[in-house]
Amino acid sequence: MSREDSLCVSVIACLVGAAMSSAMGAAMIQSKSSSASILQLPAPEQKGKMSLEEALARRRSVREFTREVLTERELSQLLWAAQGITHADGLRTAPSAGALYPLELYVASASGFYHYEARPHQLARLSDRDLRAAIRRAALDQEAISQAPAVFVIAADYERTSRKYGAARTPRYVHMEVGHAAQNLLLEAVALGLGGVPIGAFDDEALQNTLGLPTDQRPLYLVPVGHPR
């Protein structure tokens, strides 16, 4: 091999090495960014300290909260109660017409806005902004929303249900289902020593825009949850 050929090979090796190093660095940054946007939740517990009957008797609408934040365990239990997977076939804690599950569950807190992914039981962060004040403005300035450390948002994709049941029956089935999910969440809150209040009074379009929800989803319920004052 001539001296010129050796020099050429050396230059190419350096360039390839630099490119590989750069690509690896970019991959690491992307990996870190991706992992930071996912919050893996603790496995939900299925045996609590309070009976269902006691939780039913104690449930009240709570609108005033302390500043204490919710723990990951508490978030895990609340999300699971509302929409958690309870069977290998994907069946959930709340009944759904035809097991079509049109609901999507979100939570807003000081650390950002998250979407609940039921199958892996995790939260995907959609924004690092605290949207609670903006949600409060869209919901007729109800103070409980900005006071609560977590505001759960339940939205629905009506088309998932209408493909099977048609336009006439779908609203009834979806609205029944969101009531099931919200009650599950509220009862779990009581069982954890927390409180919450279901809110349906809000400007639909303003809330949709505030949250940046997909156009095929409509917000149906807000449920602020926290430690009762």
Image (tube, grey):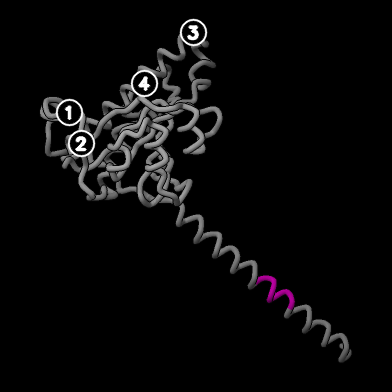
Q: Is mark 4 on a helix, strand or loop?
A: helix
Neighbour class for label 2 at 10 Å: few (<14), some, many (≥20)? Answer: many
What is the spatial separation of the Cα atoms under label 2 and label 1, in whole angstroms? 8 Å
Tell me which residue sits at (52%, 11%) in the image: 167
Of label 3 and label 1, which has the lower sequence position?
1
Instruction: Answer above or below: position of 47 versus 17.
Output: above
Of label 3 and label 4, which has the lower sequence position?
3
Whether residues under marks 1 and 4 lie with C-beta atoms below 8 angstroms apart, the answer is: no
Whether residues under marks 3 and 1 lie with C-beta atoms below 8 angstroms apart, the answer is: no
Residue 177 — which label? 4
Residue 168 — which label? 3
Residue 60 — which label? 1
Mark 2 vs mark 3: give the one in front.
Answer: 2
Mark 2 vs mark 4: give the one in front.
Answer: 2
Whether residues under marks 2 and 4 lie with C-beta atoms below 8 angstroms apart, the answer is: no
In this rendering, the count of numbered labels is 4
Q: Is mark 3 on a helix, strand or loop?
A: helix
What is the spatial separation of the Cα atoms under label 2 and label 4, in whole angstroms? 21 Å
Name the residue at the top extreme.
Answer: 168
